[in-house]
Amino acid sequence: MNKNKDTSKNIINLNELSLLECINLMPKDVQTKLCIYTWREFWRDYVPQTAKIPSWFKRKNYIEKTLWEAKQKNIHFLHLPFNTLPENKKWIMGCQCDTCINDQEICIVEKHMHYLIQSRNPYYFSENFIVKETFSNWNEYLVPIGNNYDSDNIEFNKIFDPLCGSYKENYTSKRLREGGTFEFSYPV
């Protein structure tokens, strides 16, 4: 009878044990295989932090796309949606945003006078419309690009044209902006 009493005392109720205690009751080779299986499952689903797309990446793409479109449409940097509130926008010479195109505060004659002066003096826009303390490529018509070590092959990129949309705008620039067609003739 003592044997029966001893065996009844050795029976363990698994419901009362924690997971760690249940694993410790298993044989060592089963514990090892369970550990290997668990780590394999973990690493199969794990993506390291350095491989994930950063949280700011979507915003960066939006800003780069907006800047690219602003250069193509000749919209001034201050009139981009992330720089100025719509109620604070004022007419900027050459800007092709909706606010500047539909502006009624400055009369057409005054706008034409600004364009006429700009066509005769290329520094008029930067001297009269831009704050003197600031410097930005966005206020310039042409900006050198790349490494300009070779002074014979300097390349320029058009950023902002203050004459855009006016009667003094360069004909080729206007045709490019409006999607016009061009005919090229090569000497024979």
Image (cartoon, rainbow, N blue to C red):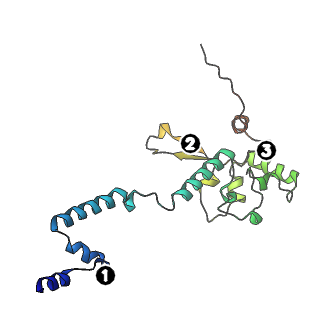
Residue at mark 1: 16
- Describe residue 151's horizontal placement relative to residue 134 as left or right: left
Residue 28 in the image: x percent, y percent? 16, 68
- Please state which of residues 160 and 33 is positioned toward the viewer in this rendering: 33
Name the residue type under label 3: Ser
Q: What residue appears at the point 51 percent right and 57 percent down from the top-left corner?
A: 57
Q: Quadrant of the N terminus?
A: bottom left
- Please state which of residues 177 and 160 is positioned toward the viewer in this rendering: 177
Q: Please identify the residue farthest to the top as the structure is shown.
A: 188
Q: Which mark is residue 68?
A: none
- Describe residue 159's horizontal placement relative to residue 29 as left or right: right
**Could you tell me how far apart the alpha carbons at marks 1 and 3 are, in whole angstroms?**
85 Å
Tell me the quarter of the picture where residue 13 sits. bottom left
- Describe residue 180's horizontal placement relative to residue 11 as left or right: right
Tell me the quarter of the picture where residue 183 sits. top right
Which of the two labelled residues, at mark 1 and mark 3, occupies the earlier sequence position? 1
Q: What residue appears at the point 71 percent right and 49 percent down from the top-left corner?
A: 162
**Could you tell me how far apart the alpha carbons at marks 3 and 2 are, in whole angstroms?**
23 Å
Mark 1 closeness class: few <14, some 14–19, many ≥20 residues within 10 Å: few
Labelled pair 1, 2 in contact (Cβ < 8 Å): no
Labelled pair 3, 2 in contact (Cβ < 8 Å): no
Q: Which mark is residue 156?
A: 2
Name the residue type under label 1: Glu
Name the residue type under label 2: Phe
Which of the two labelled residues, at mark 1 and mark 2, occupies the earlier sequence position? 1
Q: Quadrant of the C terminus?
A: top right
Mark 2 closeness class: few <14, some 14–19, many ≥20 residues within 10 Å: few
Residue at mark 3: 166
Secondary structure state at the residue bearing disc 1: helix
- Please state which of residues 29 and 73 is positioned toward the viewer in this rendering: 29
- Describe residue 97's horizontal placement relative to residue 29 as left or right: right
Tell me the quarter of the picture where residue 63 sits. bottom right
